[in-house]
Image (cartoon, rainbow, N blue to C red):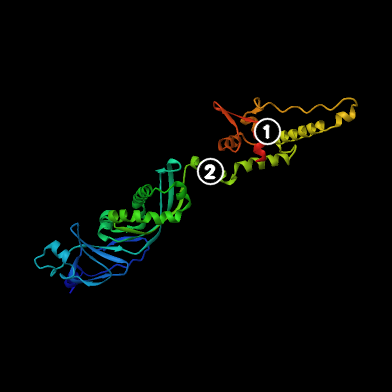
């Protein structure tokens, strides 16, 4: 009786695997050097696939269900072994269970910046990270290219193996999509959806995988590019430069002595001189009242048209209480009229008055 029990234990009657973890991708059934009995039962549960391997060659693949292992059910393995009596005697083969359910929330990221050409910034370096969901769709290709002969291939091993490969595919997809860097940083959801059709063919052909979701959570650019984006945003916020300069002048006039700076003092001085000139030009003005017999001075003639009062952009900026770059921008746009002599701008006082009234 003991001899019969010993012989019985040398054959496998039932092959099944219950996945009690959430991180297993493939699992090799532990045969312990036992042979599979003819007519043994193979049980494959939902979200599983069973792959037979004989002497390093792939045999039959079984989906969910219950199978009796006979010649009719595993013809590929029968042909590989070419037994004289087919499967009438026990046989030896490896059985791999592969999990085909969806694995969600897997992280990816670029360890080094990705170089790409951009229409706005030229060549730019990008860093990115996010999450993705995937499933195994080609069992044989996955075992061959990813899991190999590992008897218990887990998700953490997969992440280490695939992170660089997924980033490589992401880099190629991002370069071929030609999405501008500004759009990459602002349209994460659309970017992930646009890259999926580019990523899936590559990972499906190479690794037997399919991504159902690819999310880009963050894309960062180098500090110098961030500064350029901030400057562009500031220019958009300022809007009309002409109105902005006038607004700064008004602020300078409204804050005499405290925070008005050179612009405020210059504006006050100009206003005071204008008032004094007006009082002196009035008939019977202050001088005529205080000194009888002395008539008020005649109004001074305007400067000749051929000899205008010229100022540099720096002098105009000092007069208006704005930055010199604002004056240069107004000159370049044509809002402020000036004359360029060689590489230097010159502006008449009349042009400044017309600019302020415009």
Q: Along the horizontal axis of the image, is 283 left or right of 354?
A: right
**Quadrant placement of the N terminus:** bottom left
Crowding near pointer 1: few (<14 within 10 Å), some, many (20+)?
some
Q: Residue 14: name its quadrant.
A: bottom left
Where residue 218 appears, as percent x and y from the top left, is 46, 51
At numbered mark 1, what does the secondary structure look like: helix, strand or loop?
helix
Q: Nearer the viewer, residue 253 or 210?
A: 253
Where residue 275 appears, as percent x and y from the top left, is 78, 34
Where residue 79 appears, as percent x and y from the top left, is 13, 63
Q: Along the horizontal axis of the image, is 161 left or right of 358?
A: left
Q: Nearer the viewer, residue 208 or 90?
A: 208
Q: Residue 134: name its quadrant.
A: bottom left
Q: Residue at x 17, y 64 (%)?
A: 76
Q: Which residue is drawn at 28% across and 65% down?
A: 49
At numbered mark 2, what does the secondary structure look like: helix, strand or loop?
helix
Disc tally is: 2
Residue 52 vertical position relative to residue 157 in the rendered view, above or below: below
> Looking at the image, can residue 109 be seen?
yes
Q: Nearer the viewer, residue 54 or 134?
A: 134
Residue 143 vertical position relative to residue 349 in the rendered view, above or below: below
Q: Which of the two marks, 1 or 2, is nearer to us in this view?
A: 1
Q: Residue 259: name its quadrant.
A: top right
Direction right: furthest residue: 292
Residue 232 marker:
2
Q: Name the residue under label 1.
A: 319
Q: Which of disc 2 and disc 1 is earlier in sequence?
A: 2
């Amino acid at each position: 009786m003991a001899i019969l029990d010993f012989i019985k234990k040398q054959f496998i009657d039932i092959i099944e695997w219950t996945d009690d973890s959430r991180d297993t991708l493939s699992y090799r059934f532990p045969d312990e050097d036992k042979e599979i009995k003819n007519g043994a039962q193979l049980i494959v549960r939902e979200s599983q696939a069973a792959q037979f391997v004989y002497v390093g060659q792939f045999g039959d693949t079984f989906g969910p269900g219950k199978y009796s292992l006979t010649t009719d059910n595993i013809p590929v393995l029968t042909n590989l072994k070419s037994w004289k009596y087919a499967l009438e005697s026990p046989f030896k083969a490896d059985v791999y269970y592969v999990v085909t359910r969806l694995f969600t929330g897997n992280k990816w990221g670029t360890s080094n910046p990705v170089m790409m050409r951009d229409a706005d910034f030229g060549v730019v370096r990008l860093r990115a990270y996010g999450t993705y969901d995937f499933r195994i769709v080609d069992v044989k290709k996955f075992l061959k290219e990813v899991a190999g002969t590992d008897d218990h291939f887990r998700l953490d091993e997969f992440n280490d193996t695939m992170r660089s490969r997924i980033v490589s595919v992401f880099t190629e997809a991002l370069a071929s999509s030609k999405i501008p860097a500004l759009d990459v940083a602002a349209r994460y959801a659309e970017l992930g959806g646009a890259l999926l059709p580019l990523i899936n063919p590559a990972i499906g052909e190479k690794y037997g995988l399919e991504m159902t979701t690819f999310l880009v959570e963050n894309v960062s650019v180098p500090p110098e590019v961030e500064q350029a984006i901030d400057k562009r945003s500031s220019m958009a916020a300022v809007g009309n430069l002409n109105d902005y300069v006038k607004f700064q002048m008004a602020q300078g006039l409204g804050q005499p002595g405290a925070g008005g700076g050179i612009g405020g003092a210059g504006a006050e001085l100009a206003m005071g001189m204008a008032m004094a000139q007006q009082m002196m030009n009035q008939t019977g003005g202050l001088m005529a009242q205080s000194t009888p017999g002395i008539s008020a001075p005649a109004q001074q003639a305007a400067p000749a048209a051929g000899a205008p009062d010229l100022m540099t952009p720096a002098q105009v900026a000092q007069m208006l209480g704005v930055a010199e770059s604002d004056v240069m921008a107004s000159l370049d746009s044509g809002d402020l009229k000036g004359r360029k002599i060689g590489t230097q701008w010159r502006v008449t006082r009349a042009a400044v008055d017309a600019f302020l009234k415009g």
